[in-house]
Image (cartoon, rainbow, N blue to C red):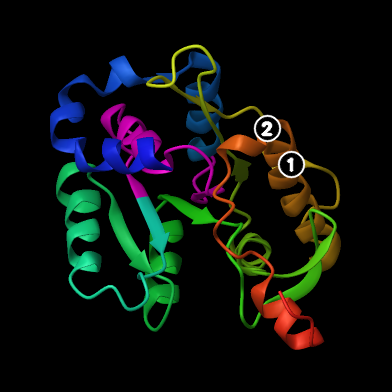
Amino acid sequence: MGMSIIEFIRFPVMKPRVEDFTIFDDASKKLLTEAISRGRGVILMVAHIDNWELAAMRAISDGFPLYVVYTPQRNQGGVNDIIAKIRTETAGMVLIGNKGPGLREIFRALKSGGVVVIMQDLDARDGITMKFLGLPAKTHDGIVKLYQKFKCPVIPVKLLRDDKNPSLHHIILREILSDRPGFGEDLMSSLELCNKAIEDLIKKNPEQWFWIMDRWEFAFRELGIKN
């Protein structure tokens, strides 16, 4: 986390050399390009693992404009403005708030064929309770509902810091999850596929996930369990 924060602060310096800090292989670019060519918009499903903002800056630099759905930081005053400024002015993201008019903006982005980034490992106050890493957790159902409405390809993204060179980051796209038979037909089974994709990534790289983010808070509160 400390390294990611330092990198985030140094984005203005790193941007001209973003290719020196990231590997975005041809297979991943080809998969994303093919998904975009379907003309229904694309959802990139991301978790709080490694430096997702650096990965976004690389993808934008390579010609893939991104609409990023974000949650404002709680009780942080001007920190929100600083974070938003770096994300938009330096990294080049288009930010969409996850509340209020944000849903309409997501609709417009997908209708226009845009690539929308959604963090799927956030704790969802009004989400569906289901197992995540073996414990009950509130899960956002928006990705599946958006797919049901727009039939936009859903792609899990692996973001990994290199084991031998921690300043180097890998951006890996290998599957259009929504192409699996039956995806979108049943909400719960589709959400389980989304959760499993993120769980598998965390289990293989537990040291890179943002563990201090309380993924189970709202489910535990609802069940009367002290966290």
Give the residue type at disc 1.
Asp
Magenta span of residues: 38-66
The location of residue 31, given as percent across then percent down, is 56, 27
Q: Position of residue 102 (x, y in %)?
A: 39, 74
- Label 2, residues with CA under 10 Å away: few <14, some 14-19, many ≥20: some
Residue drawn where x is 21% and y is 42% of the image: 9
Quarter of the image containing the C terminus? Answer: bottom right
For the point 52% across and 51% down, the residue is: 40
- Label 2 with label 1: CB-CB less than 8 Å: yes
Residue 186 in sight in this render: no
> Which amino acid, by three-letter code, is at mark 2?
Glu
As drawn, is 68 to the left or to the right of 174?
left
Relative to the observer, which residue lies in front, 205 or 32? 205
> Distance between the Cα atoms at labels 2 and 1?
8 Å
Please indicate, yes or no, whether residue 103 appears anywhere in the rendered image.
yes
* Helix, strand or loop at mark 2: loop
Q: Is residue 225 above or below residue 2?
A: below
> Mark 2 = which residue?
175
Q: Residue furthest front?
A: 226
Residue bearing the label numbered 1 = 179
At 56% from the left and 48% from the top, the residue drawn is 47
Q: Is residue 74 magenta?
A: no
In percent of the image, x 41 and y 68: which residue is there? 71
Left or right, 104 with reference to 220: left
Q: Residue 216 falls in which quadrant of the image?
A: bottom right
SS type, badge 1 = helix
